[in-house]
Image (cartoon, rainbow, N blue to C red):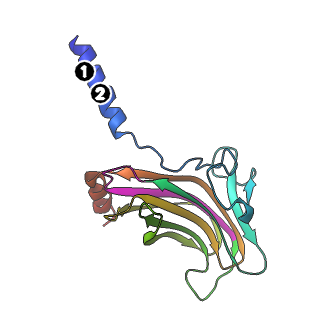
C-alpha cells in the first residue's frame, strides 16, 4: 500500500510540473492549423529543424510586414513564460532600422486582447543557420493572453520558423533561469 501511495504521489508531482506548450501546432506539422497569416508564407518540407514541416516567409520586393501569429490563453497564477523558437534566415536584407529584420515578438494582452506590453525575443539579418532563441519573461499583472508573432518585418529575404514553444514558469523556475544567465 505504501508503494502504491508513493508511486501515486510521484505521478501527481510529475504531472503538476510537466511543462505544456501553450502554442498549438508549434512545429507546423498540421500545416497552418491554429495559426493566422498563412497567406504571408508557405510550408517547407525540405528546410526544417524537425518533424515534417517548417514555416517560411519570403519576399523579394516591397519590404512589407509579413507574419504568422497565434494567441494563447495564459493559465491562472502563471508567474512567467519561456518562449523557445528555432529560426533560420537566408538573405534577409540589412536595413538601418534594427526592427526591419526577421523577428520573433511576444505581446502580452488583456482579456479583450488589447496590448499590455511587447517583447522582442529575436532579431536576425543576413544568412544564418538554424538557431534556438529562448527568453523567459515575467507575465504582467493584467495579462490574460499572449500573442506570438513570427515575422519578416519590413525587409526582403527568407526566414524559416520551427518548433515554436511557450511554456509557463513558476517564480522559482524563472528566478533560477535568470540567475543562470547573469
When asked about the image quadrant of residue 151, the answer is bottom right
Quickly name the residue at label 1: 6
Q: Residue at x 46, y 68 (%)?
A: 114
Frontmost residue, 61 versus 158: 61
Left or right, 168 with reference to 133? left
Extreme left residue here? 2
Q: Position of residue 95 (x, y in %)?
A: 63, 85
Q: Residue at x 28, y 55 (%)?
A: 176
Quick one: SS at disc 1? helix
Residue 146 appears in the picture as rendered: yes
Residue at mark 1 to residue at mark 2: CA–CA distance: 6 Å
Quickly name the residue at label 2: 10
The magenta region covers: 74-90
Quick one: SS at disc 2? helix
Question: Tag on residue 101?
Answer: none
Q: Residue at x 73, y 54 (%)?
A: 43
Left or right, 25 with reference to 146? right
Residue 58, placed above or below residue 94: above
Which of the image's four quarters has the C terminus? bottom left
Residue 130 appears in the picture as rendered: no
Residue 45, placed above or below residue 91: above
Extreme right residue here? 61
When asked about the image quadrant of residue 162, the answer is bottom right
Number of residues whose C-alpha sits closer than 10 Å to that of mark 1, classed few (under 14), some (14–19) or many (20 or more): few
Is 72 in the magenta? Answer: no
Residue 44, placed above or below residue 63: above
Is 83 in the magenta? Answer: yes
Q: Position of residue 142 (x, y in %)?
A: 34, 64
Which of the image's four quarters has the N terminus? top left
Q: Position of residue 3 (x, y in %)?
A: 25, 15
Number of residues whose C-alpha sits closer than 10 Å to that of mark 2, classed few (under 14), some (14–19) or many (20 or more): few
Asked whether disc 1 touches disc 2, contact meaning CB atoms under 8 Å apart, the reply is: yes
Amino acid at each position: 500500500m505504501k508503494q502504491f501511495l508513493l508511486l501515486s504521489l510521484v505521478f501527481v508531482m510529475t504531472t503538476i510540473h510537466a511543462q505544456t506548450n501553450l502554442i498549438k501546432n508549434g512545429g507546423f506539422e498540421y500545416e497552418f492549423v491554429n495559426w493566422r497569416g498563412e497567406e504571408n508564407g508557405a510550408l517547407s518540407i525540405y528546410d526544417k529543424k524537425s518533424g515534417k514541416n517548417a514555416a517560411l516567409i519570403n519576399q523579394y520586393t516591397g519590404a512589407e510586414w509579413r507574419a504568422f501569429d497565434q494567441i494563447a490563453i495564459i493559465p491562472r497564477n502563471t508567474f512567467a513564460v519561456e518562449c523557445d523558437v528555432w529560426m533560420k534566415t537566408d538573405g534577409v536584407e540589412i536595413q538601418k532600422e534594427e526592427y526591419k529584420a526577421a523577428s520573433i515578438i511576444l505581446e502580452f494582452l488583456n482579456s479583450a486582447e488589447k496590448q499590455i506590453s511587447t517583447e522582442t525575443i529575436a532579431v536576425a539579418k543576413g544568412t544564418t543557420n538554424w538557431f534556438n532563441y529562448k527568453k523567459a519573461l515575467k507575465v504582467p499583472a493584467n495579462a490574460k493572453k499572449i500573442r506570438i508573432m513570427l515575422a519578416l518585418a519590413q525587409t526582403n529575404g527568407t526566414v524559416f520558423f520551427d518548433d515554436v514553444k511557450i511554456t509557463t514558469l513558476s517564480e522559482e523556475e524563472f528566478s533560477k533561469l535568470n540567475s543562470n544567465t547573469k
